[in-house]
Amino acid sequence: MTQTVRRAARETARGQAAVAADYFHSYSVVGLLAVVGVLFVAVAFGAGRLLRPVVPTPEKLLTYECGVDPVGEGWAHTQVRYYVYAFLYVIFAVDSIFLFPWATVFAAPGYGAATLVEMFVFLGFLAIGLLYAYKKGVLTWT
């Protein structure tokens, strides 16, 4: 009886070791791919640095924009409202990206009530942010 228990324990240990080896093998493949990617970028940047010609001239050091020589001051003022509109766009883009997977999970059996509550909480935060932006007058174009 004791030998049977020992044999079963050894087989269980071997099975667990095989599962752990498969588990860590998956991570080693991902790690190797990350290392190869970093090396690829490093080699590309190094080759570019070694092969490019370095001949600075006053014309090359001059600011260039759209083929027009720079005129006037180099400092340009940008209004904050453009950033606010961009921020609001990002918020609603993220909202739309979140809605599509939610719709597929909501249709799955057993997830309906939990995902419905989560979505209403998420939409509530978005609505509060939109109401705040409206109250501050950010959404009015002047």
Image (cartoon, rainbow, N blue to C red):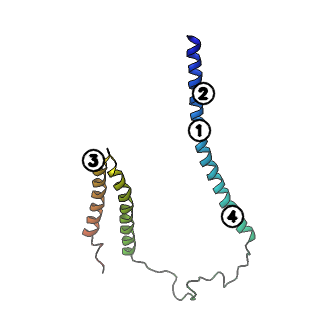
Counting residues from the start of the chain, the first of labels 2 and 3 encountered is 2
Q: Quadrant of the N terminus?
A: top right
Q: Is residue 134 above or below residue 77?
A: above
Direction top: furthest residue: 1
Residue 34: give x, y in percent of width and height: 61, 52
Q: Residue drawn 59% across and 38% down? A: 22
Camera-nearest label, 4 or 3: 3
Residue under pointer 2 = 14
Amino acid residing under circle 4? Ala
Disc 3: CA contacts within 10 A as few (<14), some (14-19) or many (>=20): few
Q: Tell me, yes or no, whether the two marked residues, 4 and 3, touch with CB atoms within 8 Å.
A: no
Residue under pointer 4 = 44
Amino acid residing under circle 3? Ala
Disc 2: CA contacts within 10 A as few (<14), some (14-19) or many (>=20): few
Query: How far, Cα to Cα, is label 4 from label 3?
Result: 51 Å
- Horizontal placement of 103 versus 11: left or right? left
Counting residues from the start of the chain, the first of labels 4 and 3 encountered is 4
Residue under pointer 3 = 113
Residue 22 - label: 1
Q: Is residue 18 above or below residue 100?
A: above
Residue 83: give x, y in percent of width and height: 40, 72
Counting residues from the start of the chain, the first of labels 1 and 2 encountered is 2
Q: Tell me, yes or no, whether the two marked residues, 2 and 3, touch with CB atoms within 8 Å.
A: no
Q: Quadrant of the C terminus?
A: bottom left
Disc 4: CA contacts within 10 A as few (<14), some (14-19) or many (>=20): few
Query: How far, Cα to Cα, is label 1 from label 3?
Result: 36 Å
Provide the secondary structure element on which disc 4 rests.
helix
- Horizontal placement of 138 versus 25: left or right? left
Query: How far, Cα to Cα, is label 1 from label 2?
Result: 12 Å
Q: Residue drawn 29% across and 68% down? A: 133
